[in-house]
Image: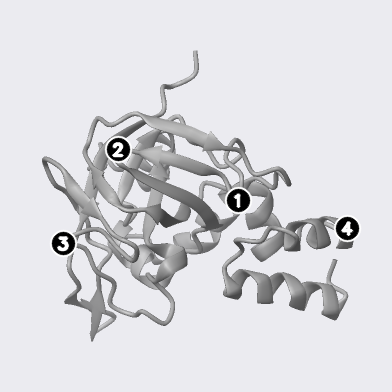
Amino acid sequence: MKASRKLLSVNVALPHTVEINGQPVRTGIFKAPVAGPVWLGRLTLAGDGQADLTVHGGEYQAAYIYPAEHYSHWEKVVGAPKFPPGMFGENFTVSGLLEDGVCIGDVWRIGQAQVQVTMPRVPCFKFGHKIGRPTILKEFLHSGRSGFYHRVLTEGTVTAGDPIELLERHPIGVTVRQMLGMQKLGEGDAAALRRALEIECLPPVLRRELELRLTSGKS
């Protein structure tokens, strides 16, 4: 039976400084669940923030979703008894939204807000530090269990327990998993890349990466 599409947990954190390899590093990855309605604005959730806005946050990464279905896999990989919601730095821990069934450009209603899927998540060293396995980044990427980002089309409150409703399936139909493969795993031929580039809502950084693959002949 398919899991119902539901917002299981809303997770936020303001940036703070931690020590990584003996150096102070600012990060907002240590998200924790919050109760009650939370305002989702154009650029972020109330009470949330990103430390390095050159690579995180902004219009195309206003909120990050991670499927709860992946938690058990990573608990086994790391040898952890149970991860709390927000362990992967996600704003929304959800059920029923997997990378091979969600398309770039899809529009969803979550609570009062409407959001549009923009891109897969590519992990950074801060995630490896948080999960206690600095070498896990490549494995995380190649697993396809990336989660994905949204931009906000309509602001509004979101609350743990809200259903998630598909409002519009993007007609080009490139899944998050397929986009991750084209973006970072060397998958997809030139025709697939050109098709993906027709998606009008692609974040500029992702569009540049796909165009670079085309012009470099690495497809």
Q: Please identify, in this view, whether the residue under mark 4 or under mark 2 is nearer the observer.
A: 2
The image quadrant that residue 203 belongs to is bottom right
Which residue is at the front of the view, 53 or 67? 53
The residue tagged 3 is 47
Q: Amino acid at mark 3?
A: Gly
Whether 127 is drawn above or below 2: the answer is below
Q: Identify the image quadrant of the C terminus.
A: bottom right
Q: Nearer the viewer, residue 122 or 204?
A: 204
Q: Which amino acid, mark 4?
A: Ala
Residue drawn where x is 13% and y is 46% of the image:
34
Sequence-wise first label, 2 or 1? 1
| Residue carrying label 4 | 191
Q: Report whether residue 11 is seen.
A: yes
Q: Residue at x 66, y 55 (%)?
A: 179
Q: Quadrant of residue 103?
A: top right
Residue 10: image x %, image y %? Answer: 23, 45
Q: Which residue is mark 2?
A: 111
N-terminal label among 3 and 2 = 3
Label 4: state its secondary structure. helix
Viewer-nearest residue: 212 or 81? 212
Spatial CA span between label 4 and label 1: 17 Å
Q: Earlier in the sequence, mark 4 or mark 2?
A: 2
Q: Are marks 2 and 1 in contact (CB under 8 Å)?
A: no
Residue 78, x across and y down, in percent: 37, 48
- Callout 4–callout 3 Cβ contact below 8 Å: no
Q: Which residue is mark 1?
A: 104
Q: Earlier in the sequence, mark 4 or mark 3?
A: 3
Mark 4, Cα crowd under 10 Å, few <14 / some 14-19 / many 20+, is few
Q: Nearer the viewer, mark 2 or mark 1?
A: 2
- For the residues labelled 4 and 1, say whether their Cβ atoms are less than 8 Å apart: no
